[in-house]
């Protein structure tokens, strides 16, 4: 799992570190930099999946650009950005550090520097023993690509292979015949980055029938197809859990959620739900008749139930369309299913009720995004690190503090000291 992401000159950030927990909640006023943080995760997912660096930023026929494209990817006026990640390894006592610097110049975005290091923690020492698996050297004028050096196991600079600068060295190393230790590290890091899933479920896209599919679309449009394609036992299991969570939502009682094949060729599926008031007969509605809030919530639960373990699920304004009184259901769902299925979740929210639902025990998982008083750069601050927090918490709930802008006010004060 990804543990930490350090952003340097990325969009509105000059330098900041995001700590990633099983559930990470980002809060902050408009334009503080919440979405900019998440954009970095989208960039990493794309480039680790083999998309070129330029295409990942600027988009192409099949891919929407990252907001602002090439023009806004570096913090103005910088011409390069860096992302440094700490990721878990196979064993308890191992981490990987992956460092990437990208140079942006007009219509070009290329690797300026990249490095992968294995960190091994001894039983007693807090500082790990580091071994570099690969690193790059600045490009030589005559060289066609960027020189990358891979560990050979012997001392010395390592084995030089010139690789393309337009793609991550990491994503190219996969295909090279390298030492086992390097291959293992590359695979670990690539897999974790590829498993980032930036999910933006759009109810209006979910109302149609969709083909049976293995992979959930980023807009949730094919939830019916994904559920219907599960094997029979798992399908029943998943639909039961969906029903259980959905029951907690609306006024109208939901008896059952399920999918069914439709059409002459039975290759598409539709989502159904049986609902009714107590005391009246129940009736069936299909996705076309379901409420926006129900569909969006259903999509999020489906993602939690069908994404691979090890995934990092990223959801903007997670409680969008949900009644504030149901915020606690959402938080409990994310925590429980995340834990059961080994999925980490990062969300943003503007909803005070969600913060109240999260309660005091969630304080360690909340990160406040705000702007530096003087430079205007975005900063990330863990709520528990705010010195005045105990005093603040004594005067109101988290939701009240956030709605009243008192968390940001406290941060401004601490910045000025
Ligand atoms: N390259 C950049 N340099 C400086 N500021 C930037 C850059 N890219 C975006 N921003 C700033 O980021 C802000 C938007 O941040 P965003 O993450 O979308 O906010 P929110 O917290 O509402 O999601 C805007 O004020 C914009 O000016
Ligand atoms: Mg935003």
Image (cartoon, rainbow, N blue to C red):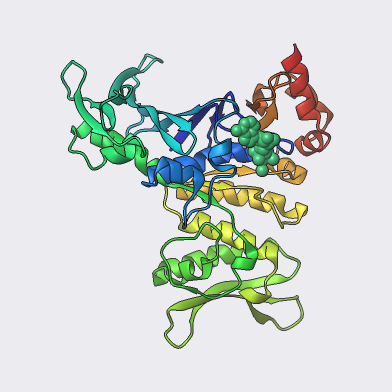
- Name the quadrant containing residue 174: top left
Rendered residue at 75%/14% (across/down): 416
In the rendered view of the protein, which quadrant contains the C terminus?
top right
Residue 97 appears anywhere in the view: no
- In this rendering, position of residue 163 left or right of residue 285: left
Measured along the vertical axis of the image, is residue 243 above or below residue 95? below
Looking at the rendering, the quadrant in which ligand 1 lies is: top right
Q: Foreground: 326 or 348?
A: 348
Q: How many marks?
A: 0
Q: Residue furthest left?
A: 154
Give the x, y percent position of residue 320: 70, 54
Rendered residue at 46%/72% (across/down): 228
Residue 179 appears anywhere in the view: yes
- In this rendering, position of residue 239 left or right of residue 368: left
- Name the quadrant containing residue 265: bottom left
In the rendered view of the protein, which quadrant contains the N terminus?
top left
Q: Foreground: 14 or 362?
A: 14
Give the x, y percent position of residue 62: 46, 57
Give the x, y percent position of residue 109: 44, 36
Rendered residue at 17%/25% (across/down): 152
Q: Residue furthest top?
A: 417
Q: Foreground: 159 or 104?
A: 104
Measured along the vertical axis of the image, is residue 10 above or below residue 284? above
Measured along the vertical axis of the image, is residue 17 above or below residue 198? above
- Name the quadrant containing residue 88: top left
- In this rendering, position of residue 306 left or right of residue 73: left
Give the x, y percent position of residue 307: 45, 54
């Amino acid at each position: 799992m990804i543990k930490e992401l350090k952003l340097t000159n990325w969009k509105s950030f000059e330098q900041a570190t995001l700590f990633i927990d099983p559930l990470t909640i980002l809060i902050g006023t408009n334009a503080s930099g919440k979405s900019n943080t998440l954009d970095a995760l989208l960039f990493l997912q794309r480039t680790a999946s083999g998309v070129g660096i330029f295409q990942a930023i600027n988009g192409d026929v099949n891919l929407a650009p990252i907001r602002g494209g090439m023009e806004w990817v570096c913090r103005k006026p910088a011409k390069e950005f860096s992302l440094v990640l700490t990721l878990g390894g196979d064993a308890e006592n191992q981490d990987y550090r992956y460092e990437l610097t990208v140079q942006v110049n007009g219509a070009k975005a290329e690797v300026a520097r990249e490095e992968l290091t294995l960190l091994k923690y001894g039983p007693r020492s807090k500082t790990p023993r580091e071994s570099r698996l690969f690193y790059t050297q600045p490009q030589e004028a005559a060289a066609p690509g960027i020189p990358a050096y891979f560990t050979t196991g012997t001392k010395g600079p390592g084995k030089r292979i010139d690789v393309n600068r337009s793609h991550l060295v990491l994503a190219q190393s996969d295909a090279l015949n390298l030492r086992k230790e390097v291959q293992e590290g590359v695979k670990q890091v690539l897999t974790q980055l590829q498993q980032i899933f930036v999910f933006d479920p759009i109810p209006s896209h979910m109302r149609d029938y969709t083909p049976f599919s293995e992979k959930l679309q980023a807009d949730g449009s094919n939830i019916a197809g994904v559920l219907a394609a599960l094997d029979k036992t798992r399908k029943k299991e998943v639909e039961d859990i969906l029903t259980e969570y959905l029951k907690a939502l609306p006024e109208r009682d939901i008896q059952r959620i399920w999918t069914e094949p439709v059409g002459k060729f039975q290759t598409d599926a539709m989502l159904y739900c049986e609902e009714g008031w107590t005391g009246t007969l129940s009736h069936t509605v299909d996705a076309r008749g379901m409420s926006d809030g129900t569909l969006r919530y259903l999509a999020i639960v489906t993602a939690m139930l069908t994404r691979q373990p090890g995934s990092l699920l990223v959801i903007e304004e997670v409680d969008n369309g949900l009644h504030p009184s149901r915020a606690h259901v959402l938080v409990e769902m994310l925590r429980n299913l995340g834990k059961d299925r080994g999925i980490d979740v990062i969300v943003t929210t503007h909803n005070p009720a969600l913060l109240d639902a999260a309660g005091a025990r969630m304080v360690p998982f909340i990160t406040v995004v705000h702007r530096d008083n003087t430079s205007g750069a975005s900063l990330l601050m863990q709520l528990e690190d705010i010195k005045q927090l105990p005093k603040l918490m004594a005067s109101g709930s988290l939701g009240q503090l956030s709605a009243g802008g008192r968390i940001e006010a406290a941060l401004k004060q601490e910045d000025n000291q």
